[in-house]
Amino acid sequence: MRSTWNSIQRKFIKKGKRSNTLQPDINCKGWKPPIGRYVLIPKNSDVRPIFKPEYVKPRYYTIDHKNPETNHLNLIFKFLKQLHTTIYGNTNFGNEWESIVQHKRNEGTTHLYFVSCDVTNAFGSIIQEELYNIIQTLCKDLPENLILKYYAVKSKKFVEEIVCYKQYFSDPNLLLPLAPGTLYSNTNMRWQQVKKKWLLEKISEVIFQQRVKINEEVHVITKGVVQGAITSSVLSDIYYNFILHKAMSTYLTTGKIIKYVDDILYVTESESVARQFLQLTKEGIPQYNCYFKPSKTRTNVVTCDGNITVDNITYIGYEINCTTLEVEYKHSHTNFSHTIKVSKKDDLPPLVYLRKRLSNIACLKLSKFILNRTINSENTIMRIIKRACLLQAEYTCILIKELFDNEPRNIQGILLVMQNIDKRIARHIIKTSLIGEIGTIDKLSFNKWNRKILHILWMSYKTVFMKDKILQPKFIRYFSQRKRIQINKSHKL
């Protein structure tokens, strides 16, 4: 296994040198982006190179007085982020999808056509010269001198959040890259002037002088953009959004294109236009070296060339029903135990560590978007909740066995942790699904839904634990007691 992996790595490096993607670093005066190392991640029969900078990457809005190279990168990142936000905005799939659902209902549209595709080697396929030309074009209307100043920033959603002070470029032609609902104001703190010419020179160096160390030899990346650097994602977003608005502009007038990193979803009412878009994914856009993976392309459009149509489209981890437009998370069929890594508990007692791990409710993926009643029916939402509760039970089962070395003790303590976490999950679901829509909920409705969700969670634990040879004898008494209590309550009623 190790020899095969080493062979794959050597093959990747040789291929890079042979294609001139990796070239020896030429010493030159002036600032150059920091050197990083390639971490090669297995991907099918190939590898995905991830760039790991040798410096410790700070938050992009901080100042590192000991490392001017880091400051330059932070400044460039800020500028590119604001430039991208100004020209293309920020894509929120949940909001985009809700607008599609509302449009279908308002217009009485009977059928929509979908094409989902994935850019091949998105970072490595970027033509560096084209990328720099695009950025120069987008900067054309900006003034020669830009002002960098501090803003006081605070989230409107989290009232108790501390005010942060962040640096952004202040200019009518540049928007601040802040989330909707964020509160901000100018400050009297020091500001500085930055020349556009200087920024473009530094951006040029970031694009054309990407340096990576392989076997102690420094190479320059001459093709594409490294994946993992602080500027990688925003450079990729600028490149592919430019392509969408230029090479795919005709499709924007006849439908909606949603892009997230290298994943693209096209939605239209016209079957013929959807076929044309599907053909585009097969041909690619050669002038920008942009091609799409045939194996990842999905559509509900029927074509004469034997193209396989589907009823459900997968996009960025969501499974979309092409008829009802309902959306669910696409869960992997991988054994759940293989995805859980239990570290050595940070020297915490097992019960404390169990509570710490189970407190991460976000892993259940019960987001406001998924629990949105505008998008999903009540039956679908209940199915999603039941599936999430079952996942929580499986997760808890594995953690208990791992933390207690297959010999769980203090069962009552474990149950108490589970009950406290269950209350948090129930409150999260109610707040996200019910209160999020109407702004408030009466006590009677709250208690009704709270009992319902807690019951689903308890039955999920029972289903999972009673099938487990290790936990079944430890917990059967408690599940039986719970059943007797429920029977007695029903008799009293």
Image (spheres, rainbow, N blue to C red):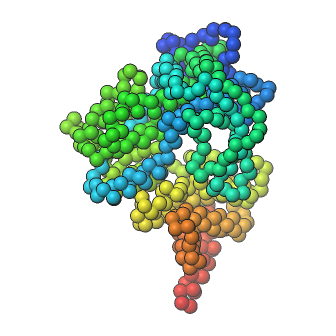
Which quarter of the figure has residue 194?
top right
Q: Is residue 492 above or below residue 129?
A: below
Q: Nearer the viewer, residue 340 or 104?
A: 104
Residue at 56% over, 73% down: 441
Looking at the image, which residue sits at the far left?
Answer: 304
**Percent x, y of residue 262:** 46, 35
Residue at 56% over, 79% down: 444
**Percent x, y of residue 489:** 57, 86
**Percent x, y of residue 54:** 70, 25
Q: Nearer the viewer, residue 259 or 164?
A: 164
Residue at 55% over, 84% down: 487
**Percent x, y of residue 420:** 67, 67
Instruction: Give the position of the C terminus as an image quadrant.
Output: bottom right
As drawn, is 305 to the left or to the right of 51? left
As drawn, is 428 to the left or to the right of 289? right
Q: In this rendering, does residue 141 appear at all?
A: yes
As drawn, is 308 to the left or to the right of 129? left
Residue at 52% over, 27% down: 141
Q: Is residue 199 above or below residue 426?
A: above
Q: Nearer the viewer, residue 265 or 2?
A: 265
As drawn, is 167 to the left or to the right of 335? right
Which quarter of the figure has residue 451?
bottom right
Q: Is residue 88 above or below residue 25?
A: below
Q: In this rendering, does residue 47 appear at all?
A: no
Q: Nearer the viewer, residue 340 or 18?
A: 18
The mark tally for this picture is 0
Instruction: Give the position of the N terminus as an image quadrant.
Output: top right
